[in-house]
Amino acid sequence: MPGLIGKKIGMTSVFGVDGKNIPCTVIEAGPCVVTQLRTVEKDGYAAVQLAYDEITEKHTSKPLKGHFAKAGTTPRRKLVEFSADFNGELKLGDVVGLNDVFEGVKFVDVVGTSKGKGFQGVVKRHGFAGVGGKTHGQHNRLRHPGSLGASSWPSRVFPGMRMAGHMGNERVKVQNLTIVKIIPENNLIVVKGSVPGAKGSYLILEA
């Protein structure tokens, strides 16, 4: 399997072999259930669909109830497809755990949704310095973007200009995070550094 679905538990720190304090993120990864197998012959591509985080049938739509019943498992909240040629090794209803994916692996890529910051100005969103000092009538422009470079030509603002706008709440992938520790009995994996998202948000871990 190329990956697992997980949930961000929070951050902590551990001491390395050299005595340095390492900031780490604790992630609950799996166990995940195989709910669909896609093949090149039938679907045009090979993939494995995994489901994570068990929920009650009350909070599941009828189509999804049938989907999970076909796989012989209880309803789950999160579904993710992983591009993989399973070569008949997996079947519907199989449970995939930490050791099945990350045994002997030293690095992991983590995909998540970053925290939403709402509508932000150019100083917070892009790191602009603002217009400058408070003298010469500049009292109300400390965090403004300054000139946009549009005059009689081109009489418009070019697309892609760094301006104020919606910040955060987007898909972010952090690559090559070092795996510090794996605790398979609790389905926990500890990685060095930070990962996108708030506590309790879903993550995709790729080996």
Image (spheres, grey):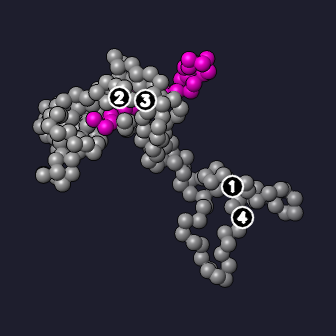
Residue for point 14% across, 40% down: 66
- Residue at which label 2 appears: 102
Depth-wise, is mark 2 or mark 3 nearer the camera? Answer: 3
- Residue at which label 1 appears: 128
Depth-wise, is mark 3 or mark 1 nearer the camera? Answer: 3
Distance from label 3 to label 4 (Cα)?
Answer: 46 Å
Depth-wise, is mark 1 or mark 2 nearer the camera? Answer: 2
- Residue projecting furthest to the right: 136
Relative height, residue 42 to residue 205 (above, below): below
Residue for point 27% across, 35% down: 1
Element carrying mark 2 = helix
Residue for point 44% across, 47% down: 171
Instruction: Work out whether residue 54 can be spotted.
Output: no
Element carrying mark 4 = loop
Q: Earlier in the sequence, mark 1 or mark 4?
A: 1
- Residue at which label 4 appears: 146
Relative height, residue 166 to residue 47 (above, below): below
Q: Earlier in the sequence, mark 3 or mark 4?
A: 3
User: Label 1: few (<14), some or many (≥20) within 10 Å?
Assistant: some
Distance from label 1 to label 4 (Cα)?
Answer: 10 Å
- Residue at which label 3 appears: 106
Are the residues flagged by discs 3 and 1 in contact, CB closer than 8 Å? no
Tell me where residue 105 sits by quadrant.
top left
Element carrying mark 1 = loop
